[in-house]
Amino acid sequence: MTKRSVSRRLVICLASPKFSLNVLCLVVTVFVLLQIWSFHITQQPILLPHSLFTYLKQQQEEPERISETETACLVEKLRESVTFLPIKDLRFSNKPLVGHTWFMSSLYDNQTQGEVQYQEFPSESSKGRFLCLKGVDEHDGSWNYYALAWPQALPVNASLQKGLTFVSYNHYDYGNMWHGLSAMVPFIAWSLRNQCEKPQRWVLYHWGELRFGMGNWLSEIITATYGPKTEFLRFADENKPVCFEKAVVMRHNEGGMLRERRMEVFDLIRCKVRNYCNISLSKTSKPRIGMTMLMRSGPRSFKNESAVIDVFRRECKSVEGCELKVSYSNNLTFCEQVELMSMTDVLVSPHGAQLTNLVLMDRNSSVMEFFPKGWRKLAGVGQLVYQWGASWSGMRHEGSWHDPVGEICQFPDTDRRCMSVYKNAMIGYNETYFGEWARSVLGKFIRVKDVVERNQGYGVLDGCRC
Ligand SMILES: *[C@@H]1O[C@H](CO)[C@@H](O)[C@H](O)[C@H]1NC(C)=O
Ligand SMILES: *[C@@H]1O[C@H](CO)[C@@H](O)[C@H](O)[C@H]1NC(C)=O
Ligand SMILES: *[C@@H]1O[C@H](CO)[C@@H](O)[C@H](O)[C@H]1NC(C)=O
Ligand SMILES: *[C@@H]1O[C@H](CO)[C@@H](O)[C@H](O)[C@H]1NC(C)=O
Ligand SMILES: *[C@@H]1O[C@H](CO)[C@@H](O)[C@H](O)[C@H]1NC(C)=O
Ligand SMILES: *[C@@H]1O[C@H](CO)[C@@H](O)[C@H](O)[C@H]1NC(C)=O
Ligand SMILES: *[C@@H]1O[C@H](CO)[C@@H](O)[C@H](O)[C@H]1NC(C)=O
């Protein structure tokens, strides 16, 4: 019934001759009109858009279902908004190692004075977000990426790696014993403060480029420290990000750590490798003073080995309880090196990676280092690494001998081009100097009553025992 038909009936009604009937008719019509009016008013909501009507109806019936859909929609938006940034930020290539560095440059480290500088994800500062990595580049770090994502909204195509992952940034390389070791030290320091927590895997970066392994000596140190199943992660697909349930990132090596903190790390490493190699001091009959000549063959070896050996043998013989061993680093297994170092109090060796073994001696042992001609002026601070290593691991670096004679370089001896001539040269000797030097170093051990006591530097830390 429309308004018009009602009005027409009203007109017809009023035209009727019977007034009483007319009055009745009028009342009925007014009533009907009112009815229609109120009907129109109650029908008003039905004129709302259909979707809104369904929404309201659904909300009345199932309030949870709709908020779920809405959440799912938001999560999808969060997932899409995860933004990957280049892991190597070229804007900072003029100061790659300063502050937040050029590696993951938007994030800041966590550091308490004197402790290791690190980042942990998820953490309060990451607002509970996981670290995600992407990219497979082995040659240019600016083609690898990082992002932070909430666990409920990991980026599209991402896979999740359970457990703890160590992410290492090393400005040098992982093959070299020394550089690899300094990349590893902060992780072990972190573990020492975190109930000895072990990583399930490592991700290695050099300048933001992926690396998939460490040198043999370093791998053995990791295995001895953390157990056998070390995995160096390889990302399978450049479009598939990998997120980590828990990640610890280091990009400053041991920078910022107090000497005491570094010594704790080496105390743990020393103890772990000796256990791993089944070396017990009671089993190995340690000499009162062990003097070891760790020789190289080829570059930076002694020109006249027998003459050098003779000098040290003579000096060792003249001290009661001193035993001299001569070994070649290139044909010792890892555990043979560990065993040799556990019996060494004075290490005599040319500058070179084999000297990294010095950290495996008992604390307060001595190191005597030898260089070919030209290194002092040209080799830069890199020639000091074993002095640093001795200091960090609680050893005594007894100085270096620089050969005054050697290869002839056509340029002045401060010209950098001469380094290629000197770098791999061989080392001569000075019988007088070596003899006096050896006497003075051995003299320190004569005064120490019980040399073997130096071994016990290691204490239990934070429930983390060797
Ligand atoms: C730094 O350490 C504090 C305290 O342990 C922690 O609350 C914070 O989330 C950490 N930040 C990072 C980036 O690891
Ligand atoms: C997810 O993976 C599929 C299949 O590999 C690929 O086609 C798609 O582009 C990926 N999506 C993103 C956002 O990377
Ligand atoms: C150490 O001893 C254990 C048990 O006797 C043995 O399984 C392991 O292979 C040994 N390790 C080395 C490096 O000799
Ligand atoms: C090495 O030094 C010894 C002792 O000074 C000397 O007799 C010998 O000839 C030298 N050998 C070489 C190859 O120079
Ligand atoms: C170790 O190497 C040195 C020189 O490189 C060699 O003279 C020696 O015979 C080797 N020892 C063994 C046990 O192979
Ligand atoms: C050898 O060392 C002694 C003692 O330091 C020094 O007096 C002498 O000049 C050195 N000889 C050479 C050839 O350098
Ligand atoms: C090492 O030597 C220093 C100083 O000579 C001494 O104070 C310290 O007790 C020694 N440490 C050990 C473990 O023998």
Image (tube, rainbow, N blue to C red):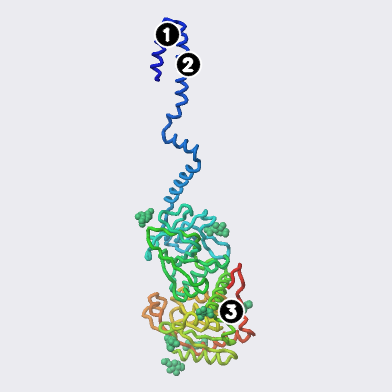
The residue depicted at 61 percent of the width and 80 percent of the height is: 454
Q: Is residue 172 visible?
A: yes
Position of the C terminus by quadrant: bottom right
- Please provide percent x and percent y for residue 164: 50, 63
The residue depicted at 45 percent of the width and 47 percent of the height is: 72
Write down the residue under mark 1: 14
Q: Give the residue type that dot 3 points to.
A: Asn
SS at mark 2 in the image: helix
Q: Residue furthest right?
A: 449
Q: Ligand 7: does it lie within 8 Å of the C-beta at label 3?
A: yes
Given residues 136 and 207, the one toward you in this image is 136
Label 2, label 1: how far apart the Cα atoms are: 15 Å
Write down the residue under mark 3: 364
Q: Give the residue type that dot 2 points to.
A: Phe
* Neighbour tally class for label 2: few under 14, some 14-19, many 20 plus, Cα within 10 Å: few
The residue depicted at 44 percent of the width and 63 percent of the height is: 96
Which mark sits nearer the N-terminus, 2 or 1? 1
